[in-house]
Image (cartoon, rainbow, N blue to C red):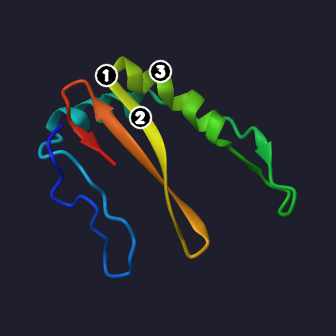
Amino acid sequence: MAASAAFGKRDRKGRKMIERSESIVALIGALHKAQKSIGGVVRDSKNPHYKNAYASLAAVVEACKEPLLKEGIVFTQALGKVVDDKLEVTTMLMHTSGEWMA
């Protein structure tokens, strides 16, 4: 995989910037096709404090996984560092062309 121009960089507020391979043309085309076939997500969880329904991470993954795989896209999630008592999680999308973004 090609190195990213923004690898490890942060914006002025210290937020992590999007990283990507040198080219993402094939990845964007595949994401476009996948998003056209991703339907609504089931709100399968309940917030006990606000009493509202929301989609769990498992429901989001269930709705997206097959359409992404059909277009040659896989994803991973990795834990990062703790910033302001919050754990960073990086989601990386990788295409069969070798292109990626995180």
Q: Position of residue 89 (x, y in %)?
A: 50, 53
Q: How many marks?
A: 3
* Res. 41 visible in picture: no
Q: Residues within 10 Å of mark 3 (few under 14, many from 20)?
A: some
The quadrant of the image that shows the N terminus is top left
Q: Residue at x 34, y 49 (%)?
A: 102
Identify the image quadrant of residue 93.
Answer: top left
**In the rendered view, would you say 2 is above or below 11?**
above
Amino acid beneath label 3:
Glu
Q: Nearer the viewer, mark 1 or mark 2?
A: 2
Q: Nearer the viewer, residue 10 or 27?
A: 10
Residue sitting at x 38%, y 77%: 14
Sequence-wise, the earlier of marks 3 and 2 is 3
Q: Which residue is at a point 24% across and 58% down the rendered structure image?
A: 7
Determine if residue 31 is in view.
yes
Q: Residue furthest front?
A: 81
Q: Residues within 10 Å of mark 1 (few under 14, many from 20)?
A: some
Type of the residue with mark 2: Phe
List the residue tagged with mark 3.
66
Circle 2 sits on which residue? 75
Q: CA distance from mark 1 to mark 3?
A: 10 Å
Task: Reply above or below: 24 against 88.
Answer: above
> In the structure shown, which secondary structural element does the residue marked by tag 1 occupy?
loop
Can you give x and y, in whole percent of width and height, for residue 48 in the image? 87, 56
Kind of residue at badge 1: Gly
Residue marked by disc 1: 72
Mark closer to the observer (3, 2) = 2
Q: Position of residue 21 (x, y in %)?
A: 18, 45
Q: Is residue 72 above or below residue 2?
A: above
